Image: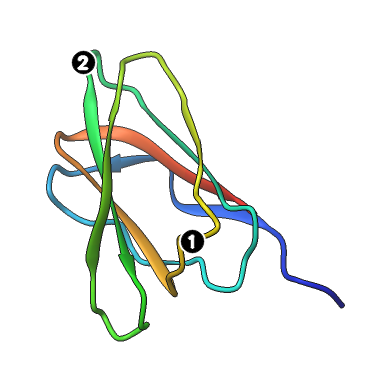
């Protein structure tokens, strides 16, 4: 059957509130994790990525990305990035996407 592959994310053009984390999204056991971040705000938005390496709600800050208005930010997470779950938080109220391909 091979390794699992797929795509999806906790936000897809969703209205998000500043400081409120997304629902957790399963990221364990996937290879070649790619992340797309975008928003509809007319100013830069910082999206913070947190990871839960144990699956027990042990959230740890991974990184924060400043996404400019009208831009899509595409990132490849390194092979060393290992976690069971991932979630995202915006620093402002906006409509945002956090989408994963693996």
Q: Quadrant of residue 40?
A: top left
Image-quadrant location for residue 5: bottom right
Q: Nearer the viewer, residue 65 or 18?
A: 65
Please give the name of the residue rendered at 14% of the width and 38% of the height, measured from the top-left corner: 91
| Left or right, residue 18 beside residue 68 | left
List the residue tagged with mark 2: 43
State the residue in front, 15 or 68: 68
Residue at image position (13%, 42%) is 18
Give the tally of numbered discs.
2
Report crowding for label 1: few under 14, some 14 to 19, many 20 or more residues within 10 A (C-alpha). few
Q: Give the number of the disc on residue 80.
A: 1
Q: Position of residue 102 (x, y in %)?
A: 65, 54
Residue 63 % position (x, y): 27, 47
How packed mark 2 is, by other alpha carbons closer than 10 Å (few <14, some 14-19, many 20 or more), is: few
Q: Which residue is found at the position 24% from the left and 13% from the top?
A: 42
Seen at 43% across and 70% down, the residue is 83
Element at label 1:
loop
């Amino acid at each position: 059957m091979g390794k699992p592959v797929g795509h999806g994310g906790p936000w897809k053009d969703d209205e998000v509130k500043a400081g409120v984390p997304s629902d957790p999204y399963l990221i364990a056991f996937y290879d070649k994790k790619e992340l797309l971040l975008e928003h509809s705000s007319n100013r830069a938005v910082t999206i913070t990525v947190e990871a839960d390496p144990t699956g027990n709600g042990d959230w740890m800050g991974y990184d924060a990305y400043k996404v400019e208005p009208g831009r899509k930010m595409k990132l490849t997470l390194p092979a060393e990035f290992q976690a069971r779950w991932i979630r995202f938080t915006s620093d402002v109220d906006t409509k945002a996407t956090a989408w994963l391909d693996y």
